[in-house]
Image (spheres, grey):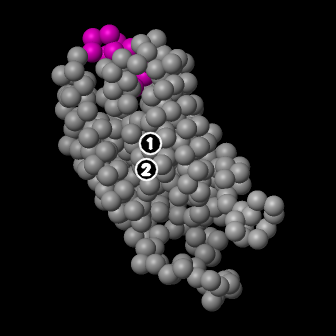
Amino acid sequence: MEQNGIILKAPFIRSKETTATIMRDVMIALAPAALFGIYKFGFRAFLILLLSVTSCVLAEYICKKVKKVQSSGYECSAMVTGLLLGMNLSFDVPYWVPVAGGVFAIVVVKMLFGGLGRNLLNPALTAKCALLIATGKFMSETDSDAMAELFEIIIFKWADWREKFCGFDFETLSGTIGGTSALMLLLGGLYLVFCNVISLRIPVAFLAAFTVTLGLCGNYGFRPEYLAMQLCSDGFLLIVIFMATDYTTSPMTPMGKVLFGIIVGALAGVFRVMGLSAAGDACAVLIGNLLVPLLDRLTFPKSFGKGKKANI
């Protein structure tokens, strides 16, 4: 079998699922949270998302033209990257921020490493951290910074949690576009699980390790209201469900996925306790991305008939 000039050896696995269909499912899952962000923040949020997606798509198109990459069809991965990046931004950032972030995510993080499936780090998360370093004042004005979260914890009520969980806390128009409603993100995650696009191993391990770390190391222990506020804080579930489970930058093996979730969840919890909530969750996942080759190697099953502990 020959594909794009490369001869592939048998056996082959045939499936109706393609990269394009998987990316479309991801965009469908992201749609409720994205539309709710537009509803809450207005037309400017729509423009930020549009600029982010457009810059990613155009950057990928230009890179492929320059490198003369032949493609059998459009796989929609750049659209997903742009949508994720835009949803991780605040609605009031300058218009050049999503454009610069989109170009950086595609050109530097993705295409320079060989394109789809070859990048070491999640493009959208890497671009988010790069923008935070370059223009911190535009990225940190959200309701997820350390002092705001501490204030919310002190005055916390369960009614406030219900409003925050559903995303209808309109008193402070701040936060990332895609992280305003934990309910919408969970609905999108359930859709991906139902469509067999992602498994629950990474999200469950991530949330479990994150919760245990906060309970053991945080100042409020395992108080339900404290843990609920942290889990529903701005954009956290967006990273857990949609970005930590990225196929390219997460382990292939079942045990590797569990270990990956535990590592990044524990790191995210430590960063929260240290007060690094603006980019701590993203940094935790990026550190985990770097460990993926090692996790795959340690947890990959041995070949039949090879070695003393081979499967029989």
Q: Residue at x 55, y 46 (%)?
A: 258
Q: Residue at x 39, y 70 (%)?
A: 21
125, 255: nearer the viewer: 255
Q: Relative to 299, is 57 on the left or the right?
A: left
Crowdedness near tag 1: few (<14), some (14–19) or many (≥20) residues, C-alpha within 10 Å: some
The single residue placed furthest to the bottom in the displayed view is 1
Residue 118 coordinates in the image, percent (x, y): 63, 61
Amino acid marked by disc 1: Val
Q: Is residue 266 visible?
A: yes
For the N terminus, the image quarter is: bottom right
216, 226: nearer the viewer: 216
For the C terminus, the image quarter is: bottom right
Question: What element does badge 1 sit on?
Answer: helix
Residue 150 among magenta residues: yes
Magenta stretch prevailing secondary structure: helix
Q: Are marks 1 and 2 in contact (CB under 8 Å)?
A: yes
Q: Which residue is mark 1?
A: 204
Q: Relative to 176, is 166 on the left or the right?
A: left
Amino acid marked by disc 2: Leu
- On screen, 301 above or below 154? below
Crowdedness near tag 2: few (<14), some (14–19) or many (≥20) residues, C-alpha within 10 Å: some
Question: What element does badge 2 sit on?
Answer: loop
Residue 35 coordinates in the image, percent (x, y): 24, 49
Q: Relative to 100, is 29 on the left or the right?
A: left
Q: Which residue is mark 2?
A: 200
Q: Residue at x 33, y 59 (%)?
A: 194
187, 139: nearer the viewer: 187
Residue 149 among magenta residues: yes
Quadrant in the picture for residue 161: top left
Q: Which residues are magenta?
A: 142-156
